[in-house]
Image (spheres, rainbow, N blue to C red):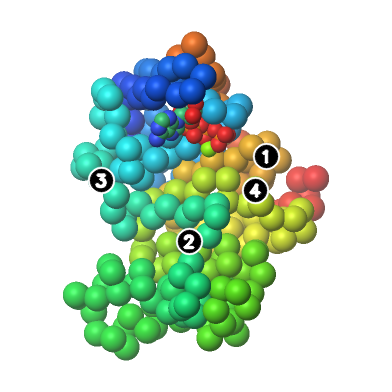
């Protein structure tokens, strides 16, 4: 594999700091390379900087020092090539599921593709998350798990190079959560996505990821142990339990 494949996301010497009510939060010496098509989870205690690292990759924050690259280009700001799926879903309440997804499609492909093609992309994304029948429903008419799936569909429809997820399933009940994890496994396998996901759930990390990256909370937060999850894919929750 060439460098671009093994260092699809390439983070070197990143430093970050915030003044918080409880003092200064400091993260230092953050080095991490993510392969193309790899699924990495970030895990660690409350406030150790997981969301901060994800936001840096998303381009929503700028580091105090160090460099973040994606596909050999410096991450200089947010871009649809790095789609973030937020925990508290960000669907527009007055738009249908179809329209919410289509918004993302138009943003990325509006200038380059015909309407029919864009429609096709939107419908494909809906089908991918198993929500074809909810096409015309508005967010208040569907469950929390379904909203989360629409969010994922919207991100995927933009064909991002990287999918970023921050404790996506944290607010869901155990059954919905298990179902969505299975769905995510299937989607990631089908789309060869590169994923960085924050979670508090070790079981979830083992089920979904290729590597688990532990953040230590410091005095200065940094990357601690990294564990390779050597389990064959496709993975099966029941077989792992
Ligand atoms: N934009 C910001 N401005 C100031 N302080 C911030 C900002 N974002 C995060 N912090 C602080 O930086 C520290 C790390 O926050 P971060 O949200 O990255 O932690 P986390 O690991 O995601 O925590 P949690 O598990 O609670 O989600 C915290 O002390 C937080 O209060
Ligand atoms: Mg967080």
In contact (CB < 8 Å): disc 4 and disc 1: yes
Q: Secondary structure at mark 4?
A: loop
Q: Name the N-terminal-most of marks 4 and 2.
A: 2
Residue carrying label 1: 201
Q: Secondary structure at mark 3?
A: loop
Q: Cα distance, mark 4 to mark 3? A: 27 Å
Whichever of callouts 3 and 2 sits on the residue coming sooner in the sequence is 3
Q: Is mark 3 within 8 Å of ligand 1?
A: no
Q: How far apart in space, not on screen, are marks 3 and 2 (Cα)? A: 19 Å
**Residue linked to disc 3:** 77
Q: Are marks 2 and 1 in contact (CB under 8 Å)?
A: no
Circle on res. 90: 2
Cα separation between marks 2 and 1: 23 Å
> In this rendering, which labeled residue sits more in front, label 3 or label 1?
3
The answer, for residue 72, to whether it is visible in the render is no
Disc 2 crowd, CA 10 A, few/some/many (<14, 14-19, 20+): some
According to the image, label 4 marks what residue? 170
Under circle 1, the secondary element is loop
Q: Residue at x 64, y 37 (%)?
A: 200
């Amino acid at each position: 594999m060439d460098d671009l494949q093994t260092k699809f996301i390439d983070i070197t010497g990143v430093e970050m700091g915030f003044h918080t009510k409880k003092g200064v939060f400091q993260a230092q010496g953050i080095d991490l390379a993510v392969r193309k098509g790899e699924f990495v989870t970030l895990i660690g205690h409350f406030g150790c900087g997981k969301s901060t690292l994800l936001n840096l990759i998303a381009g929503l924050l700028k580091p105090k020092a160090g460099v973040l690259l994606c596909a050999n280009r410096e991450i200089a700001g947010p871009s649809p090539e790095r789609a973030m799926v937020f925990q508290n879903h960000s669907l527009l309440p007055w738009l249908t599921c179809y329209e919410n997804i289509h918004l993302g499609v138009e943003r990325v492909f509006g200038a380059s593709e015909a309407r029919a093609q864009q429609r096709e992309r939107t419908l494909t994304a809906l089908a991918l998350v198993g929500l074809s029948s909810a096409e015309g429903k508005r967010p208040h008419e569907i469950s929390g798990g379904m909203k989360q799936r629409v969010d994922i569909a919207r991100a995927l429809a933009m064909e991002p190079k990287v999918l970023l997820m921050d404790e996506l399933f944290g607010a869901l009940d155990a059954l919905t959560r298990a179902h969505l994890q299975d769905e995510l496994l299937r989607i990631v396998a089908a789309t060869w996505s590169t994923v960085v996901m924050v979670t508090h759930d070790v079981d979830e990390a083992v089920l979904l990821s290729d590597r688990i990256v532990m953040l230590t909370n410091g005095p200065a937060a940094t990357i601690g142990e990294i564990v390779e999850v050597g389990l064959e894919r496709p993975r099966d929750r029941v077989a792992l339990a």
